[in-house]
Image (spheres, rainbow, N blue to C red):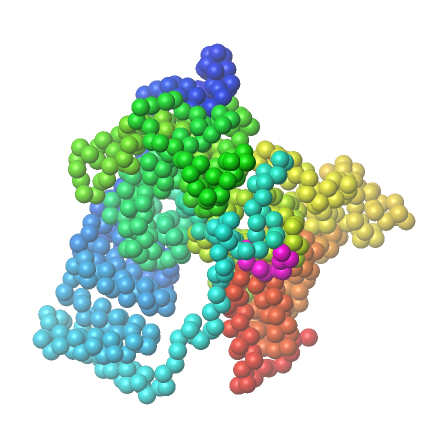
Amino acid sequence: MDLPVDEWESYLLEKWASLPKSVQVTISTAETLSDIFLHSSSLLQPEDEMLLKQLSSRYSVEKDYDAPLFYREEGNRKFQEKEYTGAAVLYSKGVSHSRPNTEDISLCYANRSAALFHLGQYEACLKDIVRAGMHGYPERLQPKMMVRKTECLLNLGRLQEARETISDLESRLTAKPALALSSYQILQRNVQHLKIKIQEKETLPESFPAALTNAFEDMALGEENKQISEASLSVSLCTHPLKGRHLVATKDIFPGELLVKEDAFVSVLNPGEMPRLHHCLANKWDTRVTRGDLYCHRCLKHTLATVPCGSCSYAKYCSQECMQQAWGLYHSTECSLGGLLLTLGVFYHVALRMTLLARFEDVDRVVRMLCNKAGNTDTCLPESKNLVKTFDYTNQGASEEKNKIGEPPIPGCSVNGKYESNYNAVFSLLPHTEKHSPEHRFICAISVSALCKQLKAASMQAQTLKSPKLKAVTPGLCADLTIWGVAMLRHMLQLQCNAQAITSLCHTGSNESIITNSRQVRLATGVFPVVSLLNHSCSPNTSVSFTGTVATIRAAQRIEKGQEILHCYGPHESRMGVAERQQRLSSQYFFDCSCPACHAETLRADAAPRWEAFCCNTCRALMQGNDVLSCSNESCTKSVSRDQLVPRLQDLQQQVRMAQKLLRNGKPEQAIQQLSRCREAAESFLSAEHTVLGEIEDGLAQAYATLGDWLKSAAHVQKSLRVVEARHGPSSVETGHELFKLAQVLFNGLAVPEALSAIWKAEKILLVHCGPESEEVQELREMKSCLLDSSFVPVGPLV
């Protein structure tokens, strides 16, 4: 979803191929982004815009006022089946399509409050009850809602409010509302039951909520770094002819130390696989769940109680506050372009939002400033009598001194010489214009031009209609589309090297299993100017984690004073081989990696990583070679063709997937039989640390945990752990996640000493990579507290 849909990209590639050679040469040899944009945008034809409009119309982002009833009924079916999460999402879809202040929206909010109540989300339930009332929830249904409100307040320990709600409910019932006798009697019984529960609660000693009993560890960076915003004092910004801008340690740094904590300058939720109108088969409306249904489109908070945009059905938020902030900052412009932005992809959305966040005056000012810097020919724009004056770098403090001695400030720094997470820093990120293919530059430029035209049309429509819901696009846009277009084109080219995938830890596993699998999933795409200063290493000395839109960089190992602080751009030595890493880095980031990990692997290029290696079926030693594999044991003469082993591996992987499906479908006994056969087959030709063997052991651990056989489950987790350690290292975050699973198994098996040992090891690793606010760290501490409780009586150790 980063780049446009295939149909649009293929169409533009054909358009490029059909251009006269002279036109291709003109665009290919253009020296500035301005020239590329002007030449390409002049080729945009009405038929091109018509195709883009047709592609955009596939995505349903408008409100459909016939949809709420459908979604409410579908949600009711899920609710009756006790699938409360699915019901909540369907009610949210109904809310997104509803008119405000109607029975439709009030009933969707009310029904969602019921689902949230059953999920134990009492605060969210209360908010939905309030929303239902604000939108005119029917008077005849109010008593039932008041019962639910009282139960929420009781569960939250808010007894005074619970008493007041019950009192109001009794007054309503005394007034003899138009209720059937049976309903009246049920309500009376509920009232009496709740009054008894309130009295019982009042006799219990007051206690603090569990969240407040745990000491909160401050995650602030401490004293301000006067050279780099959002960074600790342990970090310094340097420049180098080959490395460019980079960060180094100002002192010895220890594992787990917080180095950077930066909120994204811009972030856009990755919608995942968005349903298209023609893909909806049985119904006009789609019931599939996407990330857009589960996360706030502004702060990326996970929520089932979304608040929709008032003008479209796509954008959803975790609160009214987030919705209003997004509207004021950018969504008032983006709202009418929803289908177009989904068609063009996340990168174009990010590029647009960056310029919207900067506001037009700042875009103009920064573009002009960079164009007028000596030697900058990458962005230059034609002159205009309406130009905003450029930044003056010769009138303040450190920059004045640097100009006196002829030393230019570091790109992206302010007039005071500080690198800050702002639009100036974003704009200074390198676009590597000359390294992108002419076809890619053409596609980006003509797509940006089409987007600019739609922005102008939307702005003019908003001014004509003068609707309070529509707002004119950023001031000045219609006057000079070139500046806006060039800025977005620059951002598009920057994003290939500087966009950061914002990830979230996703827990998976069968519904019956108590232990969980964890994997990082891509949630959004963001731009972090400070994080972008970090250079790449396939074996980095830092670890990155995300909380919403905030990226946190911690030291993953000891970093000595003066040593460069390094980050992994994706190709990690434990996830892919050196050849694949080099190809990925060269094609996406335009450099050849020479980090120690790549250098070491190049020297042993004929040996596959242990997690991908085959073993000799005679002596179990590793096999080496390319087309023909030979046993690494000199006393063994065994050899075999790779073509013989690869089909066996593929068949085994298929068998493992079938077993995992059995496990997901609640058939653990059958899964164990299948996985046991797979393990026997795997051990005959795969290395002991092969990834597939790890998957098999993990599946067996899940299956035995489902059956409550914690002894066998723990044994298989420990085998899976050895595979993970061999591949990722004993101090890796992956090992931390696997130790977390082991701790869960041992805890549930009541093996106190072993569980405490696993908890200590897992917590030590996850604190370094994820910090104390991590959900897994919090759960580990809860388990440890429980095990250390003097009243906890274990059944016995697991041996």
Which residue lies at the image location 58% right of the left edge and 67% below the top edge?
763
- Evaluate whether residue 54 shows in this view: no
Q: Which SS type dominates the magenta stretch? A: loop
Q: Quadrant of the C terminus?
A: bottom right
Tell me: 626 left or right of 731: right
Q: Inspect the magenta stretch and tell me whether residue 430 lies in it.
A: no
Front residue of 1/544: it is: 544
Q: Position of residue 510 (x, y in %)?
A: 51, 61
Which residue lies at the image location 33% right of the left edge and 31% below the top edge?
388
Front residue of 181/196: it is: 196
Q: Inspect the magenta stretch and tell me whether residue 255 lies in it.
A: yes
Which residue lies at the image location 9% right of the left edge and 75% below the top edge?
175
* Picture quadrant of residue 577: top right
Q: Position of residue 676 (x, y in %)?
A: 66, 59
484 relative to 107, above or below: above
Magenta segment range?
251-259
Which residue lies at the image location 71% right of the left edge and 45% below the top edge?
596
Tell me: 524 left or right of 559: left
